[in-house]
Amino acid sequence: MIEIRDVKKLYSGMATPALAGVSLEIERGEFVFLVGPSGAGKSTLIKLIFCEQKPSSGSVYFWGKNTSSFKEAELLKHRRRMGMVFQDFRLLKQKTVFENVAFALEVVGKSPKVIREKVPAALEKVGLAGKEKSFPMELSGGEQQRVGIARAIVKDPLIILADEPTGNLDRDNSRQLMDLFARINEGGTTVIIATHAYDVVDRMKKRVVALEAGQLIRDEQRGSYDDEY
Amino acid sequence: MNINSLKYSFRQSLVSLSRNFWLAVVTAVMIAISLAILGGFLLLAVNVGQSIRIIESNVEINAFLYDDADVEAIQAKLDNLQGVQGYTFVSKDQGLVDFGQAIGDTILLSGLEGDNNPLPDLIRVQVEQAETVPELARVIQGYPGVELADYGEELVGMLIRITRWLNALFLGASVLLALGAVFLIVTIIRLSVMARQEEIGIMKYLGASNWFIRFPFLLEGTLMGWFGTMIATVSLGLIYYRVVASLQRESLAFFLQPVTDAERLFPIFAGLLVLGTLMGCIGSYLSVRKYLRV
């Protein structure tokens, strides 16, 4: 589904490239961990898949189509097929849990009827039924991230892209969230997670793509965070 | 953009306006003032134009004659002159009587009868169409025995000059005020963009289209422009109505016949409404283009 071909990415003002010639294929329904130290290029790879950034050279193909050639309408369609999950949750503090999740449907022009049906279902899926009226600040970090995940899955995306989703969470919460991602993946959604959390990666036994200094150094099915492990 | 998105945009604009309520009020008032001045100038221009036309259509050509003029020959020529509706001969004696009646004091003029009468003989020429007055006056001026063919061109010329000055003054003032109002809109929309920066970032990740993100801001500015224009047109309409009413009450309307027909007033008020709304729209568009990176 996603094919990354010899992609280089150099940010202006940076001496070393964020990605220095990475090639990678991800099939529909896969669960992929992107691992590596800070600055290895994980976030850049996620941004390239989301089309937030364009490669400096090389190409990213989505179902055979070069994403660099996307017109605005295609770009929008592409982004709407993806659900993003962030390390800092990025919830709107002045909106309730329900409104935060509903926001994802509002901005793509869904009707109030659809919103009333889908939002409770998404909250149910992430285990937050009953918290609709709470505000983000009233929730724990783990719960806030569940709201973030509910917001990502409420529009039934093809792909979930998560950048360090457990970076601000303790180990228990991290494990629970990864189990949640695994359940979402079992429903057919492709899940791509950039993470530092080696213990969860090792426990999950999923595909692991390891990056270092912008290079792909390892790509294993049922891999672990660290190959010495 | 579908109906749900439109509803969302309207809600967002109203929320934003209520957050910056007083700034929005000041902006709307600025727009109102600039448009009221512009509208006042347009109303004045229409009325002065009408007054000039009335004055012109009432003008007669006064042909002042030399004492030795052959009055009958001149009258014969006027009979054959195209565009002349009629004429009246006013002898210098009759002229003196008329003048005495006009100033209401015949004693003052005693001793000016007969050979002492300083007034010339006069033929008052009425014309068929006002716009032919200058040309006919020129022709009559050329007749032997006619000293001067006068139709009050100084008055008409002065009116036109005054109108031009007033036009320039009002136009300059309203353009400056309008620019000020547009600048205020740019600022207020910028504040509103900054207040929602985080939300805009998230919207982008959620797949909102650029237009979806921009539209509430454009709507916000347009609404401000519209409110300002409503204030302007309503107050201008009320003031104009009162001025016209008081002119008619004071019987001054005979001299200054104000424009009251809807066909000529409507375009002015409708134009102001469109212009003010457009100002709001343009101001917010400039701001969104400059400060909203999507």
Image (tube, coloured by chain):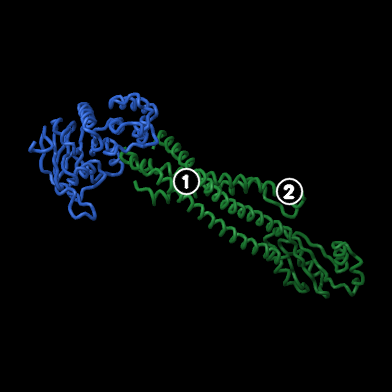
Which mark identifies residue B221?
1
- Which numbered disc flags the more N-terminal residue, 2 or 1? 1
Q: Is residue A62 visible?
A: yes
Q: Residues within 10 Å of mark 2 (few under 14, many from 20)?
A: few
| Residue that numbered label 2 is attached to | B246
User: Which quadrant of the figure contains the N terminus of chain B?
Assistant: top left
Side of B184 relative to B164 (left or right): left
Side of B47 relative to B280 (left or right): right
Which mark identifies residue B161?
none
- The chain letter corresponding to blue is A
Disc 2 to disc 1: CB gap under 8 Å: no
Depth order, front residue of A145/B144: A145
State which quadrant residue A166 falls in. Answer: top left
> What amino acid is found at the position of numbered circle 2 in the picture?
Ser
Q: Residues within 10 Å of mark 1 (few under 14, many from 20)?
A: many
Q: Is residue A161 visible?
A: no
Q: Secondary structure at mark 2?
A: helix
Q: Position of residue B174 (x, y in %)?
A: 56, 56
Which chain is mark 2 on?
B
The residue mark sitting in front, 2 or 1, is 1
> What amino acid is found at the position of numbered circle 1 in the picture?
Gly
Number of dots carrying numbers: 2
- The chain letter corresponding to green is B
Q: Position of residue A218 (x, y in %)?
A: 10, 40
Marks 2 and 1: same chain? Answer: yes
Residue that appears at 62% across and 48% down: B236
Side of B187 relative to B88 (left or right): left
Depth order, front residue of B66/B257: B257
